[in-house]
């Protein structure tokens, strides 16, 4: 049987244009040695591309001190992909697959995207050109090896760091505020150390973290990175054991997917006492810690729990309708009378960026009471019809479509297996196989996406029905509220959007949006 393969023309050559070629470089650390390597790569590719008369230099993209395990952190790579989409690049050269990506999924995703754009990549080390590959199999194997190499390097690094933790030789590369790194040793920074002492002294004198941060801002005391002093920053200093000369190693760890987590006991930790010169005495450090814990206990707040982050029913639930920022709780005074109010955090930081004024907490509570009583009174006109409509909505069509998609996905897989068999036996040209296989893969991806969306829609509909049913059960009790109930608010309200200083909108978990005056 004769085989005919269509070879598409190269549009750039057909039009007599030069091929616009770009290069991508990356080093994973910012050490001097690696920076030299990066400079060498940059010089090599620039001269290499400009030395070819049929090529036009389209730019050099490079990432410094960035891991190759995740493309989201590599700005130069993402910019290069964006320029490819905008038609600025025809061809890409890079040193190796491991320099391009150590994550198999990312590598294949980017290569396929570029191929769809008619742009190919040449990997020098592997002598691999994505424009002339017989299949994606080789690229999959090589990129998987690169990912395995990354995991191996990571495990070796972890082992070495673990040993340094155990014998106390680990170097603190970025010491906390009050210290600096001199030849691998933590040395006290006198001016910053005085600020640390001030923070502890003020805490022991009874001042809150908020009051201390405000005082530091008022005095225009610089932070290490030139940012603002916040209560969180102050509390971080008060709880850092390094200020008494100790070091607790492995406060965080990296999982197998290269994501960093706080270590709550999942990994071993190592405490080394008298590691460096102390700024605060152990007595003052412990006294400050006891004072903070006592204040938290008085408010019923335990660090690390949801209540620590959401100590009030409205915490993190009030959104500014003007700028989208969250509201914060503050204590205001008027005629020597103190009251709680909720203010837009953006307005607090910079009034020119948001004009939304504060709203009194008791006004929000009264608005919730009024809104819930309206629901109780009008449950037969609002909640009952809504629940009936949700229950009557047939999910048969959605489930039927999911079954249809699953059947089509099975057939799609069978066709890909047949294509692979034909190419293996030599009955199908590699180029034609790639074209047909890529079309089937694209079709499968589209069907999987539709299936996932349908599943989410059906699950969301079931959840909404249950939320409306729960709200109706409460309303059917016919118990009018006389005072604000925080538990009831958290049970039924998703968030509050502040439309203006006189109107807010309650976004209920069941999907209803109910506006109320304040």
Image: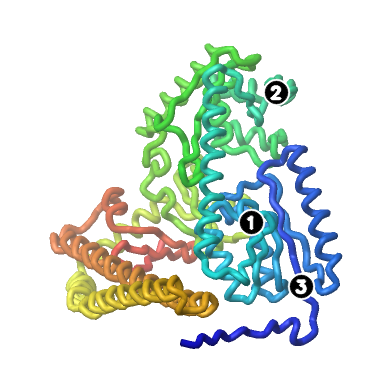
Left-right relation of 515 to 45: left
Q: Position of residue 79 (x, y in %)?
A: 68, 63
Q: Which residue is mark 2?
A: 184
Separation of residues labelled 2 and 1 (CA atoms) = 39 Å
Q: Residues within 10 Å of mark 1 (few under 14, many from 20)?
A: few
SS category of the residue bearing label 1? loop
Rendering quarter of residue 164: top right
Q: Position of residue 278 (x, y in %)?
A: 63, 15
In depth, the one of 458 and 291 nearer the eye is: 458
Q: Which residue is mark 1?
A: 126
Separation of residues labelled 3 and 2 (CA atoms) = 46 Å
Q: Is residue 254 visible?
A: yes
The C terminus, quarter of image:
bottom left
Q: Residues within 10 Å of mark 3 (few under 14, many from 20)?
A: some
Q: Which residue is mark 3?
A: 20
Left-right relation of 278 to 162: right
In depth, the one of 76 and 344 nearer the eye is: 76
| Residue 412 sits above or below residue 128 on the image | below
SS category of the residue bearing label 3? strand
Q: Is residue 446 visible?
A: no
């Amino acid at each position: 049987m004769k085989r005919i393969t269509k070879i598409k023309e190269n549009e750039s050559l057909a039009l007599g244009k030069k091929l616009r070629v770009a290069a991508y470089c990356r080093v994973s650390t910012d050490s001097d040695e690696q920076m030299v390597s990066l400079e060498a790569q940059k010089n090599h590719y620039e001269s290499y591309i400009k030395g070819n008369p049929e090529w036009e230099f389209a730019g050099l993209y490079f990432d410094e001190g960035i891991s190759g395990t995740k493309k989201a952190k590599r700005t130069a790579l993402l910019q290069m992909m964006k320029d490819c989409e905008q038609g600025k690049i025809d061809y890409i050269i890079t040193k190796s697959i491991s320099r391009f990506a150590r994550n198999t999924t990312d590598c294949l995703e980017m290569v396929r995207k570029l191929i769809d754009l008619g742009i190919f990549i040449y990997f020098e080390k592997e002598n691999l050109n994505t424009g002339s590959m017989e299949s994606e199999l080789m690229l999959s194997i090589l990129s998987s090896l690169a990912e395995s190499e990354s995991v191996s390097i990571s495990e070796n690094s972890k082992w070495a760091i673990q040993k340094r933790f155990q014998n106390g030789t680990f170097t603190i590369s970025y010491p906390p505020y009050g210290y600096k790194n001199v030849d691998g040793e933590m040395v006290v920074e006198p001016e910053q150390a005085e600020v640390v002492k001030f923070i502890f002294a003020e805490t022991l004198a009874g001042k809150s973290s908020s009051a201390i941060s405000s005082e530091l801002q008022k005095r225009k005391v610089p932070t290490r990175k030139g940012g603002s002093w916040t209560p969180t920053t102050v509390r971080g200093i008060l709880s850092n054991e390094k200020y008494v000369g100790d070091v607790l190693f492995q406060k965080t760890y990296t999982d197998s997917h290269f994501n960093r987590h706080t270590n709550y006991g999942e990994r071993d930790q190592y405490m080394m006492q008298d590691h460096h010169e102390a700024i605060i005495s152990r007595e003052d450090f412990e006294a400050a810690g006891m004072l903070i814990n006592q204040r938290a206990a008085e408010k019923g707040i335990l660090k690390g729990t949801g209540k620590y982050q959401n100590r009030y029913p409205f915490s993190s639930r009030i959104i500014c309708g003007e700028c989208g920022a969250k509201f914060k709780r503050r204590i205001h005074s008027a005629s020597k009378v103190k009251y709680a109010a909720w203010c837009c955090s953006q307005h607090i930081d910079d009034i020119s960026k948001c004009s939304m004024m504060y709203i009194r907490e008791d006004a929000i509570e009264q608005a919730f009471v009024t809104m819930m009583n309206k629901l109780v009174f009008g449950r037969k006109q609002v909640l009952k019809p809504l629940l009936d409509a949700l229950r009557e909505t047939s999910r048969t069509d959605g489930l039927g479509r999911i079954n249809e998609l699953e059947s089509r996905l099975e057939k799609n897989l069978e066709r890909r297996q047949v294509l692979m068999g034909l190419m293996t036996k030599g009955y199908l040209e590699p180029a034609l196989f790639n074209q047909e296989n890529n079309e089937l893969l694209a079709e499968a991806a589209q069907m999987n996406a539709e299936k996932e969306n349908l599943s989410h829609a059906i699950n969301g509909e079931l959840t909404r029905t249950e939320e409306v049913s729960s709200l109706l059960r409460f309303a059917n009790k016919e118990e009018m509220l006389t005072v604000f109930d925080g538990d009831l608010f958290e049970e039924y309200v998703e968030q509050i959007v502040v439309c203006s200083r006189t109107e807010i909108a309650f976004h209920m978990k069941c999907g209803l949006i109910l506006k109320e005056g304040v």
